[in-house]
Image (tube, grey):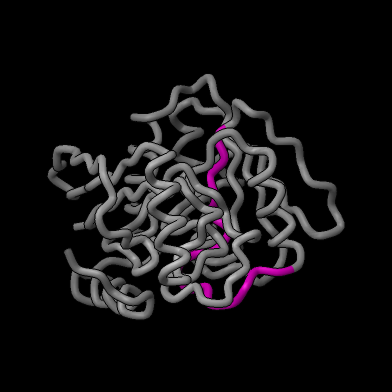
Amino acid sequence: MKIFEASRVREIDQYTIIHEPVESIDLMERAATRLTGWYVRHFKTNRKVVIFAGPGNNGGDAMAMARMLAERQFRVDCYILAFGMLSENCATNRDRLLSQGKVDLVEISDEDPLLTINPEDVVVDGIFGSGLSRKVTGFPARVIRHINDHSGRVIAIDIPSGLFGEDNTGNDYNHVIRADYTLSFQLRHPDQTIPGLPHIQYFPQEKECSRQAYCSLQSLLYKAVAHLSRLLNRIPDTVPNIVHYDYHLR
């Protein structure tokens, strides 16, 4: 199993873009297709999907996923957090989502009241990606706390928002998404590597990708992560339910 730092994963992405070749927006579309495929295999259309998107490429993945789920008859609300300038690919996927016209797309800021999340809703976290290296504060931190306090099921794209891609020493784990599932691209991040966890399940490969799901009973995973957190001070014991879904895009 290969593990790379977040900066190295970005270099791998850039290498793929140049040498496949493939446009970065098309690589994002490919990733969103895999996210959507996983989602429709695990959830039914009777549950509303509430998607939170940040201004970076993680938010672009989230909005592309929102569009694809809407095409498959899922009820989707999407909220863009207004705390920074949109990346080029994020802006492109916002425009595509608006053009489609099937998703309620709302920009929210610190001045807006936090929305109601129903227990039966499925929340998709696309606020921050693996490049985060500073503690989350202010408006994004308030949204993360709200999601943690009111959500029944949470799916994180690539990495739970607020968690650093590498060393989490000094992080504030009250401002990290508590994800039930983490759908991660290409390779594991160092923070997602928890040795010796039980109940690892392997799902059959598809032609376009190989994927592994690392599943654990919540109680056992919580104990393992809490113990490692105390020993290594890297992985928060407040985020007990990280389940890794890994695939290599071709």
Q: Is residue 244 above or below residue 40?
A: below
Residue shown at the point (28%, 46%) measured from the top left = 214
Place of residue 189 in the rendered image (x, y in percent of width and height, measured from the top left): 34, 66
Residue shown at the point (55%, 66%) measured from the top left = 56
The answer to whether residue 137 is seen in the rendering is: yes
Place of residue 57 in the rendered image (x, y in percent of width and height, measured from the top left): 49, 64
Locate the N terminus and report the quarter of the image it occupies.
bottom left
Name the residue nearer the viewer: 184 or 148. Answer: 148
Name the residue nearer the viewer: 152 or 12. Answer: 152
The image quarter containing residue 44 is top left
User: How many numbered marks appear?
Assistant: 0
Q: Is residue 134 magenta?
A: yes
Name the chief secondary structure element in magenta: loop
Residue shown at the point (57%, 40%) measured from the top left = 123
Residue shown at the point (30%, 62%) measured from the top left = 188
Q: Is residue 152 left or right of residue 5?
A: right
Place of residue 101 in the rendered image (x, y in percent of width and height, measured from the top left): 60, 38
Place of residue 96 in the rendered image (x, y in percent of width and height, measured from the top left): 53, 50
The image quarter containing residue 68 is top left
Locate the C terminus and report the quarter of the image it occupies.
bottom left
Q: Is residue 200 magenta?
A: no
Q: Is residue 173 left or right of residue 113?
A: left
Numbered range of the magenta stretch: 122-137
Name the residue nearer the viewer: 155 or 84. Answer: 155
The answer to whether residue 102 is seen in the rendering is: no
Q: Is residue 18 above or below residue 144?
A: below
